Image (spheres, grey):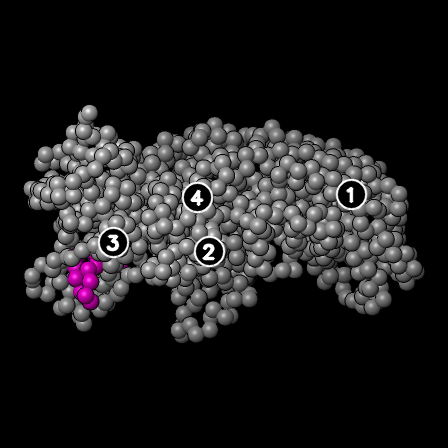
């Protein structure tokens, strides 16, 4: 194809969307940022290329060489088949990154969001400054929802920096999602990386001044020194994950975290998105503190007396707060929501007997002795003995390996005189003891999971204990293996049943020795030819954990069944739903929130299976530790969750209540509970019997409060039909999953690449890139740059089948194929691949029908209200690929099924080559007479784009309030006629 330069003197900097010629080829001028305008820099995209080939030129140096150009119509001599017409249309559609429709970002993300995930984005766009609390339950995609908002505001030119603040164990997951799904090149900022990132920074600049996209460890940033520096240089947009762990609560905990968030929210023009699956844990003060970060007017809302003001604030909160359960989505969105799996839960009981039962009861006796003999000592010594006893009970309930490791730790501490710090003041040690011991023994409350997985011991043994400890260790070591370990034997039985039904399980353990023990035993118990077992624990760095899981995913493609054994390092921040579909709780969590987090790894958005399994293994009455936790804590939470559809946290101080409940085992039901427990409960808690009654009352109160909160916050500021309409417009303007599949399949076939469907599931194919012909060297190298070679399993429907790659419109394979097809067609080098013109006879029409595939470009001007006037934001380029039908001197857009039906029309009979060329010449010659109609079409489409952008930014305005955003969309001077296709009625016989 040849573009004709328009004779003219050197031009001013061209407007976005203009076609120019420079450096020996044709380009499309892209919008300039304010910095680029100041520096007189112009960015250009090749006419047939993609964003990866964008060039930059310095206008004072090269401006004189830039010439305006126009787009040539199709060449009648290079016609092709009708099927190539659809391929060309799909390639042009999927090449768009700044498509029409109200959203700027969706062409730049590697996923197709579900309609319900657009709700937080639409809420944010209706605010002058984004302040949103997303409290959807686990597994609905809060990460996607938050990053959609961030990417949208970035692509609109409203923000330049994005920071995510999250617990340290989630940093790598956030970074991977930002890079892989949202094309945001983020860096992690934490103790191990901050110093490296700071090297080479300009004087006076911080990490956040220079690096636009960051993921920051909450534990690193909350310190006074780092917090103050961060608050000075933090960018305009901040996401806070697990925000409930930062809300100041009764007792004054989390003060550093809350001060950080309060400092961020104090900047009135800072965008803030808070994420949590548990916004209201029963502490109304902490909940109100979270709401006050959105707007100070919500401070004290829960305690506000009933009346009109409270009602108005609750109604207004619906513009800032979104909380949904799967049940809500199924009821309100139907088939337009995500197809979440059903969760099938059950329990399996093993019996401690024989040598195992004897060992358990001997360890229990030793633990009781530790507690009793410290009764007359200092309060610190009592607490240390208490923690030592709990640690032993927890480890011996886990596995022989954990029991042995814990007992060895005690013996080692005894032999090395680990009591050497007895001279330290008790008050100096007490606080550190409680923090470290709770991490080592308990499961954490709402602060996040414990990273401590080693089987804990203690240093409270006396010399006379050495012989007893050595005996217990030897006995524990002899109990390894299913012949002696009834818990392991029960696990293997349950696993065989799951595997027989086709499930791929994750087995969660509390301690690292247990995880390695199980992996070792299961490798022996399961057939090696068909199964692969891997253990992942917290002693691996986050990157290595991800690599281990990816290796298991690869084994699925080799027809092997993966079995993953993991500690709770994988219970948050890792998506396992693409490979696994069952969870086994080998060790009971002492906090039900952790059970929900574990099961949420597979029961979440993107799970391909219609039902997932969750199995809880416990020792029943034969294991008093399991039995006490299960009946007093887990069963009560399960009953409430079944009734309300949401998990309710343990009322009061979860860690202290867990300890108090377990003191029943060590001290007996009638004994007084240690006064050092800060239970945060109202009522009698002096004895176990009184505590049980008080906890029952608190569970009932927690259920009632959760039910009341569901009613209060059930209102929706946006209805499903609003989001569904925008979702349909998005698919029309950018291409759907079906368009992606059509492009890859049709392009592969026209490139003579073997591609065929796999199995009965629609949208799953196998492609062999090794058969790419020698004359496709350039394409082969481009694909290899993305590690795309050999046989590939491809999935075009979310959720993807295990072992296959999910192909979105921005997947490298889709991008490269779309670019290659468009380049070859628009250059005129290969019309047989994707022709710009064709003539066919078909039964799909009853009269001569002429179709045009058009490319339209518009320049969108946007101004933002500042309070004192409007500031201009960067201009945006809006592009669309449109199929129209020519009717005399007018054109009529064809969208959706109407366009597809004609572009897919099957030819009937042959067309004489000479006639074909003449008909095309006549049609091309008639394009000049269509220019007024094409110009009018462009103006209408520009107005439609302007209306779309204005609609999603509009909010109900109070009297006298100015419009928050102003838009003006102008069409480019010319409309590009990419393709011209004639459909003639089939001859009648």
Q: Residues within 10 Å of mark 3 (few under 14, many from 20)?
A: some
The circle on residue 489 is 1
Apparent side of residue 135 relative to residue 434 in the rendered image (left or right): left
Q: In terms of sequence position, does the residue under pointer 4 or pointer 1 come before the other?
A: 1
Q: In terms of sequence position, does the residue under pointer 2 or pointer 3 come before the other?
A: 2
Task: Judge depth for marks 1 and 3 and give the one in front.
Answer: 3
**Residue 860 drawn at (x, y percent):** 22, 49
CA gap between label 1 and label 2 equals 42 Å
CA gap between label 4 and label 2 equals 14 Å
Task: Say which of 503 and 134 sits in front.
Answer: 503
Residue hosting label 3: 830
Task: Say which of 291 and 800 sits in front.
Answer: 800
Residue hosting label 2: 790
Q: In terms of sequence position, does the residue under pointer 4 or pointer 3 come before the other?
A: 4
- Asked if the residue at tag 2 contacts the one at tag 1, i.e. Cβ–Cβ closer than 8 Å, the answer is no
CA gap between label 4 and label 3 equals 25 Å
Q: In which quadrant is the C terminus drawn?
A: top left
Q: Residue at x 79, y 38 (%)?
A: 350
Q: Residue at x 62, y 46 (%)?
A: 561
Q: Residue at x 18, y 55 (%)?
A: 1
Q: Is residue 479 visible?
A: yes
Residue hosting label 4: 756
Q: Is residue 163 visible?
A: no
| Extent of the magenta region | 19-35
Q: In terms of sequence position, does the residue under pointer 1 or pointer 2 come before the other?
A: 1
Secondary structure of residue under mark 3: loop
**Residue 166 drawn at (x, y percent):** 52, 54
Secondary structure of residue under mark 4: strand
Q: Residues within 10 Å of mark 4 (few under 14, many from 20)?
A: some
Q: Residue at x 28, y 61 (%)?
A: 54
């Amino acid at each position: 194809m040849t573009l004709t330069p328009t004779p003219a003197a050197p031009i001013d900097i061209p407007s976005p969307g203009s076609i120019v010629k420079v450096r020996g080829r044709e380009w499309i001028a892209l919008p300039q940022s304010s910095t680029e305008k100041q520096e007189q820099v112009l960015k250009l995209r090749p006419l047939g290329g993609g964003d990866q080939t964008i060039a930059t030129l310095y206008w004072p140096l090269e401006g004189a060489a830039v010439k305006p150009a126009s787009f040539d119509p199709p060449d009648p001599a290079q016609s092709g088949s009708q099927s190539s017409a659809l391929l060309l249309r799909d390639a042009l559609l999927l090449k768009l990154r700044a498509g029409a429709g109200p959203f700027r970002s969706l062409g730049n993300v590697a996923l197709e969001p579900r309609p319900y995930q657009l709700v937080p984005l639409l809420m944010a766009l209706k605010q002058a400054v984004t302040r949103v609390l997303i409290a959807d339950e686990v597994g609905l995609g809060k990460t996607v929802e938050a990053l959609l908002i961030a990417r949208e505001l970035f692509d609109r030119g409203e923000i330049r920096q994005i920071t995510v603040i999250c617990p340290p164990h989630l940093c790598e997951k956030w970074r991977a999602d930002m890079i892989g799904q949202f094309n945001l090149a983020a860096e992690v900022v934490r103790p191990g990386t901050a110093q490296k990132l700071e090297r080479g920074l300009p004087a006076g600049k911080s990490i956040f001044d220079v690096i636009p996209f960051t993921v920051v460890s909450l534990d690193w940033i909350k310190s006074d020194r780092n917090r103050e520096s961060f608050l000075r240089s933090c960018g305009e947009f901040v996401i806070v994950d697990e925000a409930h762990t930062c809300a100041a609560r009764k007792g004054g905990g989390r003060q550093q975290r809350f001060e950080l968030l309060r400092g961020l929210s104090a900047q009135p023009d800072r965008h803030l998105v808070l994420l949590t699956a548990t916004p209201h844990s029963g502490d109304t003060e902490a909940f109100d503190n979270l709401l006050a970060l959105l707007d100070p007017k919500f401070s004290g809302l829960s305690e506000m007396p009933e009346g009109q003001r409270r009602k108005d604030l609750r109604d207004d909160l619906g513009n800032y707060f979104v909380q949904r359960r799967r049940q809500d989505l199924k009821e309100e969105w139907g088939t337009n929501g995500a197809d979440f799996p059903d969760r099938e839960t059950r329990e399996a009981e093993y019996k401690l007997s024989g040598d195992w039962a004897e060992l358990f009861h001997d360890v229990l006796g030793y633990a009781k002795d530790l507690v009793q003999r410290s009764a007359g000592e200092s309060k610190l010594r009592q607490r240390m003995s208490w923690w030592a006893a709990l640690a032993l009970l927890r480890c011996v309930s886990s596995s022989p390996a954990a029991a042995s490791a814990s007992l060895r730790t005690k013996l080692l501490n005894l032999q090395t005189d680990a009591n050497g710090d007895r001279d330290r003041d008790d008050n100096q040690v007490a606080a550190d003891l409680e923090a470290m011991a709770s991490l080592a023994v308990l499961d954490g409350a709402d602060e996040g999971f414990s990273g401590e997985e080693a089987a804990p011991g203690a240093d409270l043994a006396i010399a006379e204990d050495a012989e007893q400890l050595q005996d217990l260790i030897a006995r524990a070591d002899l109990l390894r293996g299913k012949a002696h370990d009834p818990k392991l034997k029960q696990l293997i039985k349950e696993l065989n049943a799951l595997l027989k039904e086709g499930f791929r399980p994750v087995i969660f353990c509390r301690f690292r020795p247990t995880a390695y023990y199980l992996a070792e035993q299961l490798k022996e118990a399961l057939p090696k030819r068909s199964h692969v077992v891997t253990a992942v624990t917290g002693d691996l760095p986050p990157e290595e954990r991800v690599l281990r899981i990816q290796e298991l995913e690869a084994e699925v493609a080799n027809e092997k069944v993966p079995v993953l054994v993991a500690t709770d390092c994988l219970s948050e921040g890792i998506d396992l739903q693409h490979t696994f579909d069952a969870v086994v709780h080998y060790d009971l969590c002492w906090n039900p929130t952790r059970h929900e987090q574990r099961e949420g790894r597979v029961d979440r958005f993107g799970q391909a299976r219609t039902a997932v399994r969750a199995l809880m293994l416990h020792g029943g009455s034969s294991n008093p530790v399991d039995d006490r936790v299960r009946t007093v804590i887990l069963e009560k939470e399960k009953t409430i969750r079944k009734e309300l559809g949401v998990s309710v946290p343990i009322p009061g101080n979860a860690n202290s209540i867990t300890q108090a409940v377990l003191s029943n085992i060590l001290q007996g039901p009638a004994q007084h509970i240690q006064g050092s427990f800060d239970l945060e409960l109202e009522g009698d808690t002096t004895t176990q019997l009184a505590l049980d009654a008080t906890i029952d009352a608190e569970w009932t109160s927690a259920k009632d409060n959760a039910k009341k909160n569901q009613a209060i916050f059930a209102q929706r500021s946006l209805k499903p039909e609003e989001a569904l309409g925008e979702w349909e417009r998005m698919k029309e303007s950018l291409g759907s999953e079906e368009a992606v599949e059509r492009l890859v399949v049709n392009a592969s076939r026209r490139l003579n690449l073997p591609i065929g469907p796999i199995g009965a599931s629609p949208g799953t194919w196998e492609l062999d890139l090794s058969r790419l012909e020698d004359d496709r060297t350039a394409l082969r190298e481009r694909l290899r740059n993305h590690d795309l070679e050999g046989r590939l399993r491809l999935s075009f429907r979310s959720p993807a089948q295990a072992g296959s790659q999910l192909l979105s419109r921005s997947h490298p394979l889709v991008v490269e194929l779309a670019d290659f097809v468009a380049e070859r067609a628009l250059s005129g080098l290969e019309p047989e691949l994707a022709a710009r013109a064709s003539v066919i006879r078909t039964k799909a029409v009853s009269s001569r029908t002429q179709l045009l595939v058009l490319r339209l470009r518009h320049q969108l001007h946007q101004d933002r209200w500042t309070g004192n006037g409007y500031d201009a934001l960067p201009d945006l380029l809006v592009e669309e690929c449109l199929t129209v039908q020519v009717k005399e001197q007018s054109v009529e857009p064809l969208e959706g099924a109407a366009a597809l039906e004609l572009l897919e029309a099957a030819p009937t009979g042959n067309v004489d080559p000479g006639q074909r060329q003449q008909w095309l010449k006549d049609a091309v010659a008639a394009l000049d007479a269509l220019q007024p109609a094409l110009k009018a079409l462009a103006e209408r489409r520009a107005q439609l784009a302007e209306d779309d952008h204005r609609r999603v930014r509009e909010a109900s305005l109070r009297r006298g309030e100015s419009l928050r955003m102003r838009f003006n969309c102008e069409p480019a001077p010319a409309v590009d006629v990419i393709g011209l296709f004639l459909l003639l009625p089939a001859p009648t016989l």
